[in-house]
Image (cartoon, helix red, strand yellow):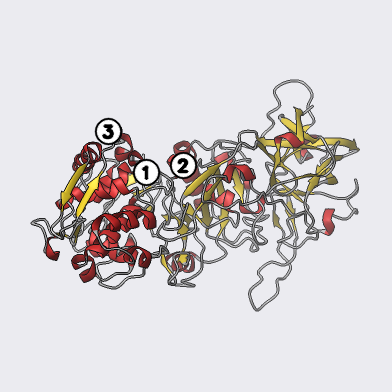
Amino acid sequence: MARRFSRFGAGALAATLAAAGLTLSSTSTASATDWGACLTGPDDTQSVFARAAQVSGVPEDVLLGVGYLGGRWSHHAGQPSVSGGYGVMHLTDRPVTPVSAPDKGDSATGLPTRAGTLLVAQERTGLSAERLRTDPVANICGAAAVLASYQPGTTAQGPAGWSKAVARYAGTADRQEALNYAGLVFDVIRTGATETTDLGDTVTLVADPGATLDTAAVSDDRVLEPGVQELECPSTIDCDVVEAQYRRTGPAVTQYVNYDLADREKDLSIDYLVVHNTECTYDVCTRLIKGEAEPNRFVSWHYTVRSNDGHVDQHVATRNVAAHAGNWYLNMHSIGVEHEGKAGEPGTWYTEALYRSSAQLVSYLAKEKGIQLDRAHVVGHEEFMSSNYKWDPGPYWDWEHYMALLGAPIKPDRRSGPSQVFTVKPGFTDNARTLTGCFATETQPGRACPSFGTNYVDVRTAPSDSAPLVWGSTDLVSDRDARAVAGHKFSVAGRQGDWLKVWWDGSAGWIKSPKGEDANVVPSQGEVVEAVRPSVPVYARAYPEASAYAGTPVPNQGQPTVAAPDGSVLTLQPGQRYVVADRTVPTDYYYAKSFDNSLPGDKTVVTGKQEYFQVWVGHRFGYVKAEDVKVIAGR
């Protein structure tokens, strides 16, 4: 189970509110919604409710129901109620008091610690606290902004879809109290009401007898919240929390750092564990993740493993999406684990303490999240296409040792019968090489690397030790394009002596693997795909088809392709065979563009019907569309 720690101690409330993106100060930055449009127009109460609903997206009957429960739509001359609420919508000054000893699991109930509704309205609209208290139009608009900010999605039109937002408006950390409040609001929506307010106008809420409170939604623990409320680590390792910064960097809601809020246990599957190396010391990386160095840089990861003792820090809750892979689809579906070290410094950084602690962490996460422990799902950053050139954890990461520590060793797994599928297993210590370009700095070029164990075999253009590497690759430590790394699977297309012909990034390549103890590959099994037409593209992300975005506020994201090492689109040709890594790939896109979830469609998951397969295509994985290939047994 995850280990819990309390975020609340003496004097901690202000810090907690700040960490949640809220503040007790009187100045704040408005959200992207044009609240001026809400303030402008007829000022009779009924018209203001209609206008606030249109601007905010909150259904009008929901706004009216919440307002009725505060004071039957009267303004009370801007004076507070006995519980400190102001105006038509009973906006409250007081912050919610956190539960000092929540029941297990209650730190993520969907009713997180937050500022009072008046303070949230001030944050969302940019209006002053005084105006929100005393101006009835501003009061209604401010409450609409609060309800919109509490709504997990942005597309629900009926009252039931706003059940959770209404419950959160109650301003209590007690779930049952919030449920009772929401029930009262829905009673009013069902029966309807007409009142003449203290401003002299008449307001009507038309009865909706079918309005039903979604109690399951209120009790749902779905929450979009920054910070780490639960320490997600096994009890067998030393683990602490060093939270990544989450804050705005400018006036626009799209200007923020340095991860995205989500609830991946409900909305997105977590399918991959991505192995990184830090390229900086533990201390420097800690400053980076906290925003003390390069404060406006949008980069984050979930965990860091320290080299000298294997200590682990968690920076981002696994429910949230960290910016670690340079590939949004991979970010959506993965947990990023950084290891203190430098990919171009052989043997200097990857200690046994680090390997073992990381393996215990990853084993725990795989069990908790249902991630397969194999080399198709425990992957290196270099093994997926990134927005820039990445090659970590590099040639000096001992994949065979690491997978053995995970209890998923790379070994022969062919059960019966002939097969043309093999898995790379070249050893490590006895696979020493002398590469170039090690110990490079920003001011000094790299130099010759000492001979050290490596995790790969070369892929050459012909069956000869003197043949060039594919794609014009070199022995530079960072040159990944012609390296079949331990755990990589491929289908053998032919044999010549000690050499195996394989398909590699759309072309033929050759891997040397003598028989016997010197073999660099082991017999395996699995399915392979073959293109059913010429030039089948390989995709970098398993995004939905264009039609899946219809009717949503989310723009079509396209279907980005993998670039071959020469910059062209990587394609597969008939007759070439590539091993399937996963046939159950989710086809989706998570739209996350703002700090405060205020943009239309923000924090929406678009799910498509397009079927993809994850395949080994070269030194990276790619995705192919099911209709573009045929799947056959790898024999």
Query: Which labelled disc corresponds to residue 212?
Result: none
Q: Residues within 10 Å of mark 2 (few under 14, many from 20)?
A: some
Q: Residue furthest top?
A: 416
- Could you tell me which residue is drawn at 71 percent across and 42 percent down? 616
Label 1 belongs to which residue? 222
Tell me if label 2 and label 1 are in contact, CB under 8 Å: yes
* Coordinates of residue 366 in the picture (x, y in percent): 49, 39
Which is nearer the eye, 75 or 23?
A: 75
Q: Earlier in the sequence, mark 3 or mark 1?
A: 3
Label 2 is placed on what type of residue?
Answer: Asp
- Say which label, 2 or 1, has the lower sequence index: 1
Q: Is residue 109 visible?
A: no
* Residue depicted at 24% across the width and 64% down the height: 14
To which residue does mark 3 refer?
Answer: 209
The Cα–Cα distance between marks 3 and 1, rounded to whole angstroms, is 28 Å
Please, what secondary structure does the residue beneath circle 2 have? helix
User: Mark 2 and mark 3: span between their CA atoms?
Assistant: 31 Å
Q: Nearer the viewer, mark 2 or mark 3?
A: 3
Which residue in the protein does label 2 denote? Answer: 267
> Few, some or many C-alpha atoms within 10 Å of disc 3 (few <14, some 14-19, many ≥20)?
few
Question: Residue 114: image x %, image y %?
Answer: 27, 56
- The amino acid sitting under disc 3 is Pro
Q: Of the residues under marks 2 and 3, which one precedes in the sequence?
A: 3
Name the kind of residue labelled 1 in the image: Arg
Identified at 47% across, 36% down, the residue is 367
Front residue of 104 and 459: 104
